[in-house]
């Protein structure tokens, strides 16, 4: 599907610097959109009349604008500005950015690490979630609330290993590097979590294990929003 970024004529790279396929609308096409927004529904005769063009001369522009979904042609009614494209443009855009392109470095600790040391890791690395690995593979996740729960319970946090309080596989929600940023946002909201490990599958004796290669957190997604806004 085409990425139509008609509100961002100067850039054909996405926020990660990757080239995206864009259509640059001509001044006449922009003028047609403006007219349709103002006078919708409007027939092609009226658009042609307003722009002092013949219908034949206008036809290629209308074809482009309907094909890309910016305008909708309603039989016997005329052209209307479709509400769908702006959403689908953003959807397509977010679908086009992959987790592997925006992921940041995860903080990994072992199951044997104590709760106390886990809290120290949170502070030192300025993160809210630690991912837990055993023999290089993902086995769990621990976040702020897990630490708070155990800390207010009066347990000796110097003795308890993090493996006791972590959320375990197979309950860990993760991303593959080729999953999109839209998928990441959807998972974060649907599962009410702050951070997703980005994993690659490794097979040992035909058993699939997950190796963590990065993470996508709410902070990564918010940074992306800022970059998208400042790119325009
Ligand atoms: P916080 O504890 O700061 O509210 P989260 O909302 O991310 O952070 O964590 C809520 C719960 O979800 C915690 O119990 C945590 O162990 C668990 N959790 C964190 N990340 C994941 C993940 N990627 N998949 C599954 N569970 C997770």
Image: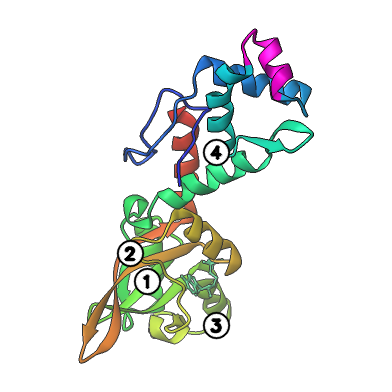
C-alpha gap between disc 2 and disc 3: 26 Å
Q: Position of residue 100 (x, y in %)?
A: 32, 56
| Residue range corresponding to the magenta coloring | 44-54
> Which circle's residue, 2 or 3, is located before the other in the chain?
2
Identify the residue position indicated by label 4 in the image.
67
Determine the secondary structure under disc 2.
loop
Which of the two discs, 1 and 3, labels the residue nearer the N terminus? 1
Where in the figure is residue 215, as x and y percent of width and height? 37, 61
Q: Is mark 1 within 8 Å of ligand 1?
A: yes
Residue to which mark 1 is pinned: 131
Please state which of the two labelled residues, at mark 3 or mark 4, is closer to the viewer. Answer: 4
Regarding residue 217, the answer to whether it shows in the image is yes
- The residue under label 2 is 107
Q: Residue at x 40, y 49 (%)?
A: 97
Q: Residue under label 3, please give it.
A: 154
Estimate the spatial distance between the alpha carbons at disc 1 and disc 2, rounded to whole Å. 6 Å
**What separation in Å lies between label 3 and label 4 (alpha carbons)?**
64 Å
Depth check: give the residue in front, 182 or 56: 56
Mark nearer the N terminus (4 vs 1): 4
Mark 1 vs mark 3: give the one in front. Answer: 1
Percent across and percent down for residue 228 are 47, 36
Mark 4 or 1, which is nearer the eye? Answer: 4
Q: Is residue 125 above or below residue 49?
A: below
Looking at the image, tell me whether mark 1 or mark 2 is earlier in sequence order.
2
Q: Alpha-carbon neighbours of circle 2 within 10 Å: few (<14), some, or many (≥20)?
A: some
Residue at mark 2 to residue at mark 4: CA–CA distance? 46 Å
- Furthest residue toward top: 52
| Disc 1 and disc 2 in contact, CB within 8 angstroms | yes
Q: Nearer the viewer, residue 100 or 20?
A: 20
Q: Is residue 48 magenta?
A: yes
Q: Is residue 148 left or right of residue 71?
A: left
**Res 146 label:** none
């Amino acid at each position: 599907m085409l990425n139509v970024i008609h509100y961002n004529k100067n850039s054909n790279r996405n926020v990660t610097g990757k080239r995206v396929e864009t259509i640059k609308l001509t001044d006449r096409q922009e003028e047609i959109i403006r007219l349709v927004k103002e006078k919708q529904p409007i027939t092609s005769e009226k658009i042609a009349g307003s722009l002092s063009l013949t219908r034949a001369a206008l036809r290629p522009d209308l074809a482009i604008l309907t094909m890309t979904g910016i305008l909708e042609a309603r039989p016997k009614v005329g052209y209307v500005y479709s509400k769908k494209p702006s959403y689908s443009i953003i959807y397509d855009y977010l679908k086009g950015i992959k987790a592997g392109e925006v992921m940041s470095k995860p903080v990994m600790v072992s199951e044997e690490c104590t709760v106390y040391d886990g809290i120290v890791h949170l502070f030192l690395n300025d993160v809210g979630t630690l991912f837990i690995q055993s023999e290089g593979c993902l086995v769990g996740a621990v976040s702020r609330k897990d630490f708070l729960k155990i800390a207010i319970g009066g347990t000796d946090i110097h003795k308890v290993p993090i493996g006791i309080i972590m959320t375990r596989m197979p309950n860990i929600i993760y991303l593959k590097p080729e999953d999109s940023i839209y998928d990441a946002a959807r998972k974060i909201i649907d599962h009410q979590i702050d951070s997703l490990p980005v994993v690659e599958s490794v097979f040992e004796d035909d058993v699939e294990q997950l190796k963590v290669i990065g993470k996508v957190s709410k902070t990564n997604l918010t940074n992306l929003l800022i970059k998208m806004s400042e790119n325009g």
